[in-house]
Image: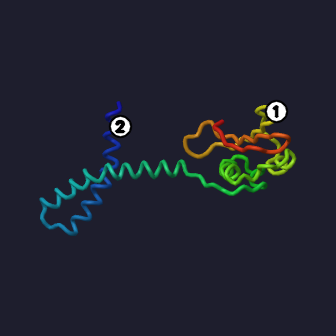
């Protein structure tokens, strides 16, 4: 019964808003009719904004993750947090021109191959609604890195 859930959600959000306005207006509005009208009007008008702010705050909190500079030790010790360094690796071009041995020294053993000249490293699941995770693709030509990209896993 979707309507009952909506009513309960609206009441849950409206009650604190109502009591806040009631407390605030009681201090400043002495006329009882104006006091009630201001309280109800503010509650009805402000509650959708409170709801929207709560939803946006929750989504921001769930989806936020820091972007960190690449560090070999962190990369190897905390593979579940690699997604924090993936963008830095791609944008800084730190692997471009490196040999396979140099890449292996910095990133460790590859997670899988995507062809004879492509290495893949799993970056992990980002916070939020990411269900596939991301993969760092490193393309080689003549045993040197020519391209580094991130793709959905």
Q: Most extreme residue toward the right, as rendered?
A: 101
Mark 1–mark 2 CB contact (< 8 Å): no
Lateral position of residue 22 relative to residue 90, left or right: left
Q: Position of residue 126 (x, y in %)?
A: 61, 45
| Residue depicted at 30% across the width and 55% down the height | 17
**Mark 1 or mark 2: which comes first in sequence?**
2
SS for callout 1: loop
Q: Position of residue 11 (x, y in %)?
A: 31, 46
Q: Residues within 10 Å of mark 1 (few under 14, many from 20)?
A: few
What quarter of the picture does the N terminus occupy? Answer: top left
Q: Position of residue 73 (x, y in %)?
A: 78, 55
Q: Residues within 10 Å of mark 2 (few under 14, many from 20)?
A: few
What quarter of the picture does the C terminus occupy? Answer: top right
The mark total stands at 2
Quadrant position of residue 112: top right
Q: Position of residue 14 (x, y in %)?
A: 30, 50
Q: In the rendered image, is residue 152 in sight?
A: yes
Asked whether 117 or 75 is in front, the reply is 117
| Residue depicted at 75% across the width and 42% down the height | 138
| Residue depicted at 36% across the width and 49% down the height | 51
Asked whether 20 or 81 is in front, the reply is 81
Residue carrying label 1: 116
Lateral position of residue 17 relative to residue 142, left or right: left
Residue carrying label 2: 5
Lateral position of residue 42 relative to residue 16, left or right: left
SS for callout 2: helix
Q: Nearer the viewer, mark 1 or mark 2?
A: 1
């Amino acid at each position: 019964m979707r309507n009952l859930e909506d009513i309960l959600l609206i009441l849950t959000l409206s009650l604190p808003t109502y009591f806040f306005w009631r407390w605030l207006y009681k201090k400043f509005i002495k006329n009882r009719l104006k006091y009630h009208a201001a309280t109800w009007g503010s509650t009805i008008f402000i509650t959708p904004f409170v709801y929207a702010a709560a939803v946006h705050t929750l989504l921001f909190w769930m989806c936020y993750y820091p972007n960190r500079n690449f560090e070999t030790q962190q990369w190897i010790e905390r593979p579940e947090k690699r997604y924090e360094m993936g963008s830095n690796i791609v944008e800084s071009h730190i692997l471009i021109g490196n040999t396979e041995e140099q890449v292996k020294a910095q990133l460790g053993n590859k997670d899988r191959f995507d062809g004879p000249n492509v290495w893949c490293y799993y970056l992990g699941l980002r916070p939020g609604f990411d269900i596939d995770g991301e993969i760092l693709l490193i393309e080689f030509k003549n045993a040197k890195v020519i391209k580094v990209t991130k793709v959905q896993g």
